[in-house]
Image (cartoon, helix red, strand yellow):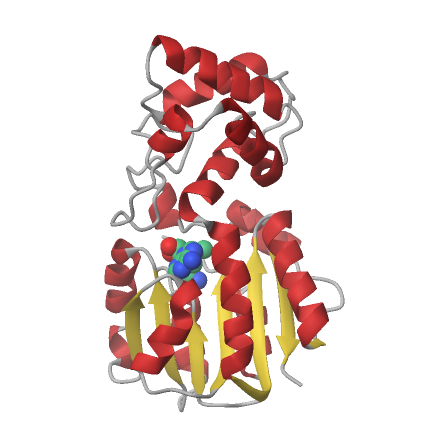
Amino acid sequence: MHVPVLLQEAVHLLTEVGGELFVDCTVGLGGHARAILEKNPKAYLVAIDRDPYALERAEENLRAFEGRFSLYHANFADLDQVLKKEGISHVDGFLFDLGVSMLQLRSDRGFSFQRDEPLDMRMNPQEDLTAYHVVNRYGEKELERLIREYGEEPYAKRVAKAIVTARAKKPIETTGELVQVVSSVLPYRGGRINPATRVFQAIRIEVNGELQALSSALPKCLDFLRAGGRLVAISFHSLEDRIVKNFIKAHMKVLTKKPVRPNIEEVRANPASRSAKLRAGEKR
Ligand SMILES: C[S@@+](CC[C@H](N)C(=O)[O-])C[C@H]1O[C@@H](n2cnc3c(N)ncnc32)[C@H](O)[C@@H]1O
């Protein structure tokens, strides 16, 4: 159901120099985790996800590897606490496969603008901030800022104004209502991409504090990596990719001068992979 992106490339870069202890910071349904354990019979994997539903599925999908992995419900920003609990001080490789899983997109949590669902977008339903709150309670300036910064939407000002005007009449309750409000002020761009895509991305990033989590996790990885250990990260939009790229460049030996992209066959088989960029670094 969730096709792992850049699977061979990610597992190869992560494990080609050997090692036995790996951390999958975004285990999702366990696609990459499975391949790591299959291809490296001596490997032990600590697997983290903030989505409790993903962990249930990962546990099922990794059943054949009983005793060789442990699963943690946590934000990867807290990976130091997870590793302390496990009694681990050195790691051979960290993997991040960022963004949302198919499971999340197809859940009823409002990640997709293709169905009409309550505005939620929390990866971890135990956290407080929802898309409903962002859309209906944030001030106009704050909305404009996050739509511009996190959505890279050039019409952020218009969109923020339209949201504030619409919600003054009646709260915006569902993804369908939000799509209507947003689309009504955006010029139709003609392409296959829904005009509300960038706004949805912006709100999801805000709800889940995605950029902050990534920025605080990367230096923690470096603290735990042994010399020669690897960091591999797959990102799906330029903001994440920039954080990963700058971090690796500043602190590690760069293994991917240009990001690794899926080839045509992969994109054809799995359109969700089209914007993926993989970068890898090695601890000096
Ligand atoms: C693209 S999916 C990973 C798919 C996985 N590699 C597989 O093959 O099944 C991304 C996952 O990362 C999780 N995630 C995103 N941000 C996170 C964070 N800050 N901490 C922990 N998990 C996070 C999401 O809940 C989601 O399950």
Q: Residue at x 39, y 67 (%)?
A: 78
Q: Position of residue 137 (x, y in %)?
A: 38, 27
On screen, residue 193 versus residue 168, left or right, reads right
Q: Residue at x 54, y 45 (%)?
A: 271
Above/below status of 202 relative to 236: above
Residue at the extreme top? 169
The one of 219 and 73 positioned closer to us in this rendering: 219
Q: Residue at x 38, y 18 (%)?
A: 177
The one of 61 and 269 positioned closer to us in this rendering: 61
Q: Position of residue 106 (x, y in %)?
A: 34, 41
The one of 262 and 26 positioned closer to us in this rendering: 26
Q: Residue at x 52, y 37 (%)?
A: 202
On screen, residue 275 versus residue 208, left or right, reads right
Tag count in the figure?
0
Observer able to see residue 26: no
Quadrant for ligand 1 reads: bottom left
Observer able to see residue 271: yes
Would you identify the image quadrant in which residue 68 lies? bottom left
On screen, residue 212 versus residue 121, left or right, reads right
Q: Position of residue 219 (x, y in %)?
A: 55, 71
Above/below status of 145 relative to 162: below
On screen, residue 271 versus residue 100, left or right, reads right
Q: Position of residue 230 (x, y in %)?
A: 58, 79
Q: Quadrant of the C terminus?
A: bottom right
Above/below status of 209 relative to 157: below
Residue at the extreme right? 257
